[in-house]
Each structure stands twice: as C-alpha cells, then as structure tokens.
Image (spheres, rainbow, N blue to C red):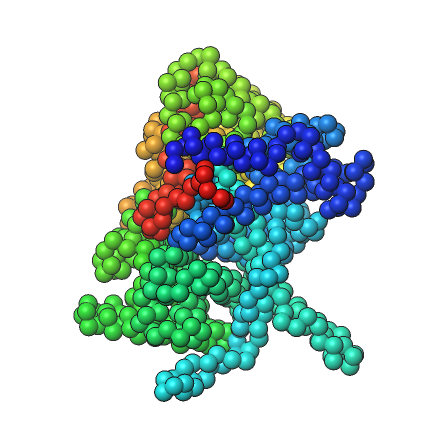
C-alpha cells in the first residue's frame, strides 16, 4: 500500500469515529457522568484528565480491535517482544498526537476551562521501567505500530514501579512509586486471560504408554492476570497491544485460618503471590531477593508463552509451523528463562519429542544483548533454580549436555574451551549462565550499536561467533521522533515543519537532511536560536518553581541525565565541575571574572537501592550544588542542579533545553545509549567518548559537530595494565579536585573517602584519571565555541539534520528484515477491519 493510501485510511477511520468538537465534548462529559459518577457541570481538573483519557482510550480500543481482527484474519506471523521493563511515560499526549486529534481535544477542553498541558500534568508516569532498556522497548512498540507490524509487547504490571526518588540532606531516599493510586484509565483488565504459573515443588517421572514422562508438581501456584494497554501507531489505524501480567493467588483467602484467629496466615498466600509483581528490580543482595527476581522473570515468561501458544493453537494445528507464525524477541537476558519454559510446555504439556521441540524453539527465539561487561551478564545459582524451577534445571542440563557433546565431537574442543562456553559455570555453587544459553539457543543475537556488536564478535562472544557465523548481527538502537521531537519539543517541530514544508519527517526522519540547506542562513539561525532560548526559559521556570533554584536561560545548559552508574562517569563530570569552581574562585579573588561563560550543570538519575557507591556520587553532586549555588563571589557564573526522580516526563522538559549533553562512558562499556540520540535530535551538541552509538552519531552528523575526547576502545586494556602499578593520581587537575573534597570545601568529606581513594590509577577501573584532562579541555573548547553564536547555532542545526538514522522506525524495520522475517500488515482500504 502506498503511504498516501495509508494516510487516507487513517483519515477515513478518524472520520468514522467522529473527532469533531461537539462529539469530543459529549464523550468527555459522558465519561465524567457515567464512568466517574461526577457532576458533568462541575468537575475537577483530575476528573477532567480521567474523562479525557477514557475518551481517548475509546478511540484506541476501536483501532485496537480492528487491528487484532486484521492480524487474526491474515493469520500472519506475529512478533512478541519480551521485556522486563517498559518506560512508557505519560500516555495522554502521546495518544492524542498519534491519533491526530490533539488540536480538537485542546479546543474542547479549553471550552471547559482546562488546558491540555495542565491535564497532562495530572497523569503519573507509568512505573514500569527505569532506564534505557525500558525506554527502548517503549519506542519500539510505538514504531511497530506506526510501521504496521503484527506485534505485541509482554511484561509485568508492577504495582509500585522501581521507586520514587527523593533527596534528603543530599542522599537518595527511596519511597514507593504509587503510580496506580488513582487507577489507570489506559489499561483494560482481562479477567478472561489468566494462566497458572507453578513455583517450587518437585519433579517425578511417570511411565506413560511406555515412555517416561516428567511430572512437575506441588509447590506454589500463582495466577497471572492480563492487563492490556493499547499502543497506537502514528498516522495509521494500526494499534498494537502491551500485555502486562499481574500476580494473584489461586485462593484469595484462608477462611479456616481466619476463623482459628490466625489472621496473618489467612492473607499470607495473597501477599506472597502479589509480591511477584509488586516492585521492579527488587534488591537482590539477599537470597530471598534473588529468588523474588527469578520468580518475576519466570512468572511473566511462563504466562506469556502460555498465551502465545493459546493464540497459535486457535488458528493453527501443525506445530512445525510455530516458527512461521511466532517470533519471540528477548530484550536482554531477563526473559531467557523462556527458552527452557517453551521446551517444557512443548514436551510436558503438549506431548512433543525433544528433537521436535528443540527445532521449534531454535527457530523461534532471538536475543538482544545490552551489555559488553561480562560481570553484568545474568546468571542464576543452581541451588536457587533447583529450589524454584526444578524441571527447568533438568532441561537446562540436557541442553548443555547436548551442546557439550557438539563441542567435543564436532569442534574437538578441549576442557578449557568447554568450561568457557558451557551454560553451566562450575564451582560451589554452580551457576547457569543465561547469556550463554541465549547465544547457544537463539537463531540470532544482536548488538545495539556498531561498536557494541564488534566487541561481541571480537571478545565477549568471539568463540560463539566463530562457531555460528552469521548469528551475531547489529541493529543500532533508535528513538521515536513522535515523543522525542514532536511531543517534547513542539516549538522546534513547528519550525522544522514550516522550513521543510510538511511534518512527514515524523515518519521518515531522513527528511531532516533538508535542514542542511538552511544551516548557513542567518535568519533561520536566529529562529532556531530563539526556539532553544524559549525552551531554556521553560526549564528555568520549572527549576525555580519546583526547586527554588534561579538560573540564567542565557547560560550554557550542560546536562547529564541517566541512570547513576560508575561506568557512565557522573563522578568524572562532577569532579570537572569541582575543578571549574575552584578556578572561578581563584579568578574572582583576582577580580578576573570578565569573559567567563556562565554555565548551568544539571544532573538527574536514580541509583539502584543497593548500589552504595552510586548513592555516594549523588550525595557529592548535591553537596557541590549546595556550596556552589550559595557562593555569591562567583557572580552566578556556575550553578549545579540535581533534579530528583528522573523519568520520561522530566526528560521531556530537560532535553529540549540542552546546549550540551554528557555521554562520557569509558570506551567499550556503553552498549549504545539512546539519550545521546534524544539530545542530538533536539538541537544540542554531544560531549562524549567514542563509545556506543556516539561513533555512529559522529559519522552521521560530522565530527566537527561533537566534542569528542578520551581513550579509544582499543587503548583500554593496555591502559588498565599500565595503571596496575601506579598508585598516585597523575592529572594535576584531578588531584586538585580531590583535594577540594578532602579539605571539606563541600562539607564533611568522610562520605567521599572511598570515592577519592579509588581514583588512584591502580583502582581506577573506569579510567577517570586517564580521561580527565582530555575531558576538561573538551569543555574549554565548548566555552570558546559557545560564544560564537552563529557557528554554535549552525552546529546545532547540523546535529538535528543528521539524526535520520536514529529513528526507532528504522530499528524495527532492521529487526523485521534481519531477524524476525516479517512484513508490515497494512490496513486494508476495502476490507473489514
């Protein structure tokens, strides 16, 4: 179907569901009265948000039902995307944008006395994710729908998300994220879609018709209940589904225990079951925490696969066609337990022989790797698996035994090779290496940036790559331009639309190349710079309103917002700020502040609850902020801000205001990154190492439009080896920054002693000391070029113009072609939906 035909269909469907102003107003007030049971002539802002959301959901359900009917009618191959997290953000603005009705909704609400933006702020971010992994999954769902793929996402409906971050006396404090406290108008509860999931118990062997059959029995059985969230495509009637599972007990209430006076025991089973879907990433420092994490992973994988099989059998009867109808993408190692689970379901529940089940599974699963650090690859102890999933452990051992036999007979592997490549890591206790199983069993394994994939091939999975040529492929990550340009940066979107003559770039991001022809136009540069200034003013007002911090919108906005982790090197950034602050104090004392560039340095991000060093980095950032922001001697030339509880909605406020953004991981540690793509798309310049997707961004936008510093990946191992014998910090600038901390400039230095001690080369695993001077000098270049407004604006235009490759639309099309072997199933203009 031609793109114009598809757009015509979308317009036809929009007319069919009536998007005129009176209809929208009537639907909103109907939901106020009948869904919310409120007075339709006098309702609150929150009631207005809820009613508006329900009204928008009605439209989504129309497209959702039609799309599912179309997929079923075609009996097409479906993609099932399994992810432990989905960082969706708020749904109202995204739904109205993708439906193409935000204009009329805005007018309708204005007549009720409400602004659409004000209502959007009533919505809490869905607590279903934390960082880049979950946001990537959300972008992919948007693109799968926009590009008309028959696809579903599957995950867990977390009751409390990860946590809500507060800052108390500079320290991170974790409180429950009560994102569901007001209900969730975007989801549909599917009480008719429930599956039992067994945990624990034992396995016995029974002879059935002359064959031994494994019977997994006893233990605990919980119920997975489905909650569906429609995911609309943009400029299309395709609407796909995100199905999330919530855990419930098989028996709600132990009445006998209650009648005996044992009230806690009466609800014990419910509490145990509900804990499985309560919190994203429970603390796994304890044995019980590890068990809960594994329960979560198995719970959602088992329910998902049972649902996939149910849907397959509804339309098909030949198991050999399963891989022709089903593609399962494992987003990182969290869902890898799906491999032995599908084997168990096929063999134990549906009676297939091992070889037939294995052939099906190998053609069904693909695996996305998201880390190049061996220590970050997930593994489970054999005792934990034996306790929780005894049947699966048997299957894993059988898979491994067959693989080892292949290694010894076909590859003539020695013991050392077998030990390295085995799924089972020997020791006390033994461990099951989930990444090894995924690489061995899946038909494709993909990295998420060119450098990342080369590292997988050259080192992390090198022997597997030689053994299975063609299995490892690259699919560079991407972001959806609908949320990360149109929704979060309407001013820039409007200017680009006016300049290019249409908004087609929102579905074909390569069209941004057309901006290059305007990059030297002084009048266009002025318009571009004015958009950025207005975005900075918006963020400045937000900082003043919410945090009481006043910043100058004309200052250089320098931003690093992402998960707090040592390899992302927020520590190196704040140490650079400390050195700059010392330099400003010195100049102030000499009366020499003229010509200094004012700078606002913004940090945001959460540290995992058990990641104590990351928490100390947050404490240091806040201590620096408190001292610097109160120092009047430097004439407000430097402000430091830590914005708490970083999430999608906060990112949408921060990213459009960036002048520069920091993507400064140690080379060879960041698989890809997607925040770098968001910042560059939104007309900011990257300060970064040649790591992850930074390399491809440099190639796309031009090295002259980035500020690149630091060691290269090929230098890392040699540098670490040379550092192993060095016990003194070699960078004088870094040493001065450390001295500032130790001397108490930022308060009691004792919380930072370990941080400082680990900056000597022999302990500096992420090589902050080796990159520090190069990092500082890159920032000196930033300040020099920032003062040349024409040159700076041209660079920003060129940054946006070169970002076409980094659309998640392109990413999912690459997956479809290289891995899933699926074609778009576009709406039919003449057939029923």
Asked whether 507 or 448 is in front, the reply is: 507
Task: Please indicate whether residue 818 sits to the left or right of residue 644 in the image.
Answer: left
Residue 822 visible in this rendered orientation of the protein: yes
Would residue 758 appear left or right of 165 to someone viewing this image?
A: left
Quick one: which residue is furthest to the top in this view?
523
Q: Where residue 427 appears, x then y in whole percent?
A: 38, 74
Where 408 falls versus 206 (above or below)? above
Q: Nearer the viewer, residue 610 or 461?
A: 461
Q: Position of residue 589 (x, y in %)?
A: 57, 25
Number of numbered discs on residues: 0
Compared to residue 208, the image places residue 610 above or below, namely: above
Question: Is residue 137 in sight in this rendering?
Answer: no
Q: Is residue 400 above or below residue 238?
A: below
The quarter of the displayed image where residue 635 is located: top right
Q: Quadrant of the N terminus?
A: top left
User: Which residue lies at the image location 31% right of the left edge and 58% below the top edge?
Assistant: 443
Residue at 47%, 31% in the rendered image: 8
* Residue shown at the point (46%, 12%) measured from the top left: 523
Residue at 68%, 50% in the rendered image: 183
Q: Nearer the viewer, residue 740 or 79?
A: 79
Residue 233 drawn at (x, y percent)? 49, 40
Q: Is residue 507 left or right of residue 458?
A: right
Provide residue 728's location: percent of width, then percent of height.
Answer: 40, 48
In this rendered view, identify the residue nearer to me: 705 or 359: 359
Height in image: 243 above or below 479?
A: below
């Amino acid at each position: 179907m031609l793109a114009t035909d598809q757009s015509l269909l979308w317009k036809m469907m929009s007319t069919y569901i009536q998007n005129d102003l009176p209809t929208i107003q009537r639907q909103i007030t109907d939901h106020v009265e009948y869904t919310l049971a409120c007075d339709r002539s006098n309702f609150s802002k929150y009631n207005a948000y809820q009613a508006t959301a329900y009204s928008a959901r009605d439209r989504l359900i129309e497209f959702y039902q039609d799309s599912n009917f179309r997929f079923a009618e075609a009996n097409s191959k479906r993609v099932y995307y399994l992810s432990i997290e989905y960082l969706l953000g708020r749904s109202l603005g995204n739904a109205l944008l993708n439906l193409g009705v935000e204009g009329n909704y805005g007018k309708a609400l204005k007549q009720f006395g409400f602004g659409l933006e004000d209502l959007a702020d009533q919505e809490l971010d869905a607590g279903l994710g934390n960082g880049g992994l979950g946001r990537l999954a959300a972008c992919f769902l948007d693109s799968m729908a926009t590009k008309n793929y028959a696809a579903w996402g599957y995950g867990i409906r977390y009751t409390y998300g990860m946590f809500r971050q507060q800052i108390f006396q500079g320290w991170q404090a974790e409180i429950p994220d009560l994102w569901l406290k007001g209900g969730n108008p975007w989801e549909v509860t599917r009480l008719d879609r429930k599956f039992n999931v067994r945990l624990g118990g034992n396995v016995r062997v029974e002879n059935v018709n002359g064959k031994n059959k494994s019977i997994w029995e006893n233990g605990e059985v919980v119920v997975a209940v489905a909650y569906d969230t429609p995911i609309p495509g943009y400029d299309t009637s395709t609407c796909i589904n995100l199905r999330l599972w919530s855990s419930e007990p098989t028996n709600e209430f132990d009445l006998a225990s209650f009648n005996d006076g044992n009230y806690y025991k009466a609800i014990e089973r419910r509490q145990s079951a509900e804990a499985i879907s309560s919190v994203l990433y429970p603390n796994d420092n304890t044995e019980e925490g590890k068990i809960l994490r594994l329960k979560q992973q198995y719970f959602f994988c088992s329910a998902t696969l049972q649902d996939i099989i149910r849907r397959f059998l509804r339309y098909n009867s030949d198991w050999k066609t399963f891989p022709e109808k089903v593609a399962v993408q494992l987003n990182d190692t969290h869902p890898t337990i799906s491999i032995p689970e599908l084997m168990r379901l096929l063999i134990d529940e549906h009676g297939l022989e091992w070889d037939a089940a294995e052939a099906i599974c190998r053609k069904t699963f693909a695996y996305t790797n998201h880390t190049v650090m061996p220590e970050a690859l997930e593994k489970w102890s054999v005792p934990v698996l034996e306790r929780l999933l005894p049947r699966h452990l048997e299957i894993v051992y059988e898979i491994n035994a067959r693989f080892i036999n292949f290694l010894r007979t076909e590859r003539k592997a020695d013991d050392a090779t077998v030990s390295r490549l085995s799924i089972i890591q020997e020791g006390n206790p033994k461990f099951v290496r989930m990444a090894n199983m995924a690489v061995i069993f899946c038909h494709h394994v993909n990295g998420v940036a060119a450098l990342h994939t080369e590292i997988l091939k050259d080192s992390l999975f090198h022997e597997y790559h030689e053994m299975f040529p063609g299995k490892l492929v690259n699919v560079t990550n991407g972001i959806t331009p609908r949320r990360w340009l149109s929704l979060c940066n309407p001013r820039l979107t409007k200017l680009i639309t006016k300049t290019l003559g249409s908004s087609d770039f929102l579905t074909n991001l390569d069209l941004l190349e057309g901006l290059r022809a305007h990059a030297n136009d002084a009048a266009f540069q002025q318009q571009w710079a004015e958009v950025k200034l207005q975005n900075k003013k918006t963020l400045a007002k937000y900082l003043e309103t919410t945090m009481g911090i006043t910043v100058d919108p004309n200052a250089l906005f320098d931003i690093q917002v992402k998960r707090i982790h040592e390899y992302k090197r927020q520590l190196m950034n704040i140490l650079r700020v400390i050195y700059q602050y010392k330099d400003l104090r010195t100049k102030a004392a000499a009366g020499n502040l003229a010509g200094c560039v004012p700078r606002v340095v913004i940090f945001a991000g959460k540290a995992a609850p058990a990641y104590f060093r990351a928490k100390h980095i947050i404490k240091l950032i806040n201590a620096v902020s408190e001292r610097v922001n109160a120092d009047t001697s430097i004439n407000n030339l430097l402000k430091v801000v830590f914005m708490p509880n970083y999430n999608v909605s906060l990112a949408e406020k921060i990213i459009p205001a960036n002048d520069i953004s920091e993507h400064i991981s140690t080379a060879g540690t960041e698989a890809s990154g997607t925040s770098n793509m968001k910042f560059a798309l939104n007309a900011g310049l990257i300060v970064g190492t040649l790591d992850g997707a930074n390399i491809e961004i440099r190639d796309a936008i031009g090295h002259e439009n980035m500020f690149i510093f630091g060691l290269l990946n090929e230098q890392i191992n040699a540098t670490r080896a040379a550092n192993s014998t060095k016990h003194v910090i070699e960078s004088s600038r870094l040493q001065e920054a450390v001295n500032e901390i130790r001397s108490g400039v930022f308060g009691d230095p004792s919380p930072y002693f370990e941080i400082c001690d680990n900056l000597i080369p022999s302990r500096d695993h992420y090589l902050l000391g080796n990159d520090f001077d190069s990092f500082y000098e890159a920032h000196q270049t930033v300040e020099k070029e920032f003062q040349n407004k024409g040159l700076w604006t041209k660079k920003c235009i060129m940054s946006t113009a070169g970002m076409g490759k980094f659309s998640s639309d392109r990413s999912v099309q690459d997956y479809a072609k290289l891995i899933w072997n699926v074609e778009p199933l576009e709406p039919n203009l003449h057939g029923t939906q």
